[in-house]
Image: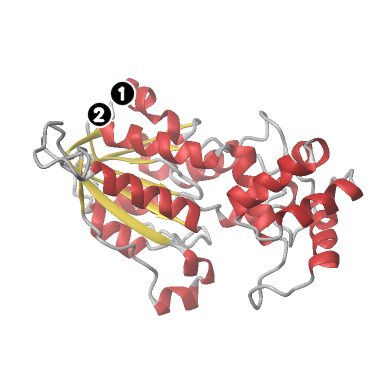
Amino acid sequence: MVDHEQPNDYGHQPVLLHEVMAYLGPQPGGLFIDGTLGAGGHAAAILAATAPTGRLLGFDRDPSALAFATRRLTPFGERFVPAGHSYAEMGPVARDRGFYPVDGILLDLGLSSRQLEDGNRGFSFLKDGPLDMRFDPQTGETAADLINNLSAEELADIFRRYGEESQSRRIARLIVNNRPLHSTTDLARLIESEIGRRGKPGRHPATKVFQALRIAVNSELDEVERGIRAAVELLRPEGRLAVISFHSLEDRLVKHFFRDAARDCVCPPEQPVCTCGARPALRLVTRKAIQATAEEISANPRSRSARLRVAAKTGI
């Protein structure tokens, strides 16, 4: 039976799957959006739970990921609708395809294992390949474009802002003095040769630089904020938005957005009487970020850094 497919049948372990399903609570006939389709693990579980008539719209701007997930979800037939767009653009696409209002939306902001393991994509310093890092390899500047053309000051700003790298200036000067650089291993070895491994045990010294470049190349933080705003507009009253983040910059952005949207007054604190008339757009479902259990981390080490936050749209 189609709806008995297991989410990990394709060698992919969806992060925080049990928690996502518990908080989104998909029911038969439900209408859902997966804004970050990836390998399709979460989508498969949601489609199984919403059988026989529930539908899911899945977004991914990575053509390879979209093709892989579409093949995986083929058994669900027309109940699965693929969309080759960024989740930040989900608003008009969802409405055009009949997904409005929806019962729940998931955003899993992490890289998929398939993206990390494909050296040709350039996301990992553990795999030799071109410094690309684009989610959509057909458009936009690559990481190599940034590395080889920006000034030391501009690179340092990227490393500090998006990687929270304490040695951003030193690394930026190192890169400028040794470019051009074109491969992931060239960049990783250069940083390791100068910085060494004095950070967290087990963490490669290029980790934060690679994160920063990926975020800059794909405008990820801007995408997150635009995507969350679009998602809130698409939800039905009491519909739920679940967001999984993998680093502090994303989690902080999600936390602050949810907190601000759940406020019922935006007047200055010193003003004794509310005059703004504001009403909360969201209700916090999780007060704190949900983390993976020890059992999940043991089975899937990548889940260690995952943080799940959930909010529901108010009926106001």
Find residue 239 and report its image quarter: top left
Q: Position of residue 279 (x, y in %)?
A: 14, 36
Q: Amino acid at mark 2?
A: Tyr
Task: Name the foreground residue: 41 vs 218.
Answer: 218
- Asked if 301 appears above or below 54 in the picture, the reply is below
- Give the Cα distance between marks 2 and 1: 6 Å
- Dot 2 and dot 1 residues touching (CB under 8 Å): yes
The secondary structure type at the circle numbered 2 is loop
- Residue marked by disc 1: 95
- Asked if 110 appears above or below 305 in the picture, the reply is above
Viewed as shown, does residue 1 lie left or right of 183?
A: left
Task: Name the foreground residue: 79 vs 126.
Answer: 126
Task: Name the foreground residue: 84 vs 302.
Answer: 302
Total labels drawn? 2
- Residue marked by disc 2: 100
- Asked if 6 appears above or below 212 in the picture, the reply is below
Q: Position of residue 51 (x, y in %)?
A: 24, 47
Q: Residues within 10 Å of mark 2 (few under 14, many from 20)?
A: some
